Image (cartoon, helix red, strand yellow):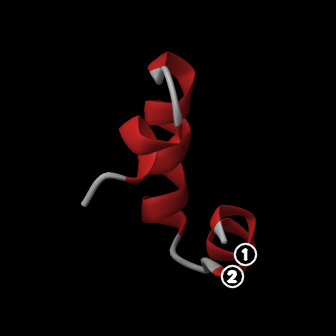
Amino acid sequence: KTHERICNCRDLAQLDTWFAKAVVADGLEDIFEN
């Protein structure tokens, strides 16, 4: 589900946000919280 969400995302700003959060995240919840 998460892999699909990332691969299907075409919004570069969103991808940048996820990447920035991934650097310091403890888990997926920290990256993809709404």
- Please state the horizontal and vertical placement of residue 5, each as a whole percent of the image: 62, 74
Residue placed furthest toward the left: 34
Mark 1 belongs to which amino acid?
Answer: Glu
Residue tagged 2: 8
Q: In which quarter of the image is residue 23?
A: top right
* Label 1 Cα neighbours within 10 Å, binned few <14 / some 14-19 / many ≥20: few
- Give the answer, above or below, for where 19 lies relative to 10: above
Separation (CA) of disc 1 from disc 2: 6 Å
Badge 2 element: helix
Going 51% across and 75% down the picture, which residue do you hit? 11
Quadrant housing the N terminus: bottom right
Could you tell me how many numbered marks the image carries? Answer: 2
Name the mark nearer the viewer: 1 or 2: 1
- Please state the horizontal and vertical placement of residue 32, each as a whole percent of the image: 41, 53
Going 60% across and 77% down the picture, which residue do you hit? 9
Q: Tell whether label 2 touches label 1 (CB within 8 Å).
A: yes
- Give the answer, above or below, for where 27 lies relative to 26: below
Residue tagged 1: 4
Going 66% across and 66% down the picture, which residue do you hit? 6
